[in-house]
Amino acid sequence: MRVVAFLTVVALAGCASKSPPGVKVDASLEKLVPRDTILLAGAQWDSLLKTPLYQENFANRQIPQIDEFAKRTGVDPRKDLSELLYASNGRGGVLLGRGKFAIQGVPRSAYKGFNFYGDDRNAVVLFSPAAAAAGDVDALHSLIDQRGKSSGPSAALAAQMKEIPAAAQFWAAYSGGSIHLPFDDASPLANLNKLIASVQTGTVYFDLREGLNGLARADCSSDQDAEQVAGAVRALIGIGRLSVPKNHPELAQVYDTLRVTQEARRVRLYVAVPQTMVDQFLGMWLRR
């Protein structure tokens, strides 16, 4: 009996020590997520900077845009950021950041006690030395108006986030609702908005610790809609394969690592690109 009791205690302790499934958001950013958010996308920036993909392709590369941003604001994304979170209600959104912030310069304006750094259209606002938000001024005003009224992502969005591994460096969760991507109506990508309209919920994530590995999942409103989404994704993969430069035919193998499946209303896109292919593809793109 003592042995049984001991094993029972050990089992219960093991269950209690398991953390809830899914990707996590820092509490300083979670409480800023507006209540009407239907799309949440995050980046574990400090983890990303340690991956082979970043270290081998970007760590020692001068990027003028980032250098200018660091000079103008006093915030260097390569040193001062640890987490990014984009929250959208389908009509607009804000970018939330966690890190070490010491924005320089004179505030352009203020709203309800918070200073705005930027111009009349886009700005950055500090909520604390470790939390900031960036976006258009109207969206930032709305964010401040809702501050203290939100308890984090909605239950529907939190349910989608549980499907995403905690180790993912990039991820996004969509809980359903009207959303429009900023593609020109004449662009070949404009049809994506029609496809998104048939998606009820979805997630996507990427793990960059060993190459590029990830999974995109879409739950559609019907089996027929799922067939159309799966067909469209396969077509985009085919277009990508055709766009490979003739002098680099080996890069077509990148598209061979992508796999699309459909089960009733659910569509999945599996991504498993080896590190060597990632480096080769990025090397060509960076040389351009």
Image: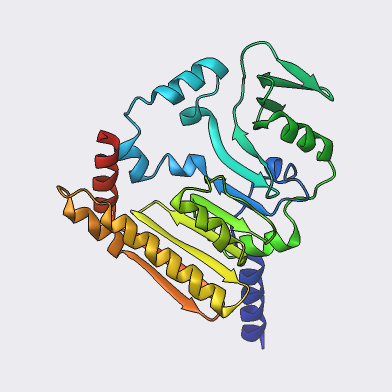
Q: Residue at x 25, y 52 (%)?
A: 277
Q: How is the image coloured?
A: rainbow
Q: Residue at x 63, y 73 (%)?
A: 221
Tell how many labels: 0
Which residue shows up at 40% across the image and 41% down it? Answer: 50
Looking at the picture, how far across and down is residue 60, in whole percent?
32, 29
Looking at the figure, which quarter contains the N terminus?
Answer: bottom right
Q: Position of residue 164 (x, y in %)?
A: 55, 61
Nearest to the observer: residue 72 or residue 28: 72
x then y, percent, for residue 132? 66, 31
Q: Is residue 135 left or right of residue 154?
A: left
Residue 87 versus residue 207 in the image, above or below: above
Q: Residue extending furthest bottom?
A: 1
Q: Position of residue 103 (x, y in %)?
A: 62, 19
View extreme (left): residue: 247
In the image, residue 189 sits, relative to residue 121, either above or below, namely: below
Q: Is residue 20 visible in this depiction of the protein?
A: no
Q: Nearer the viewer, residue 73 or 19?
A: 73
Height in image: 109 above or below 20? above
Quarter of the picture holding the C terminus: top left
As drawn, which residue projects farthest toward the top?
106
Left or right: residue 268 compared with residue 133: left
- Work out whether residue 243 can be spotted: yes
Q: Quadrant of residue 32?
A: top right
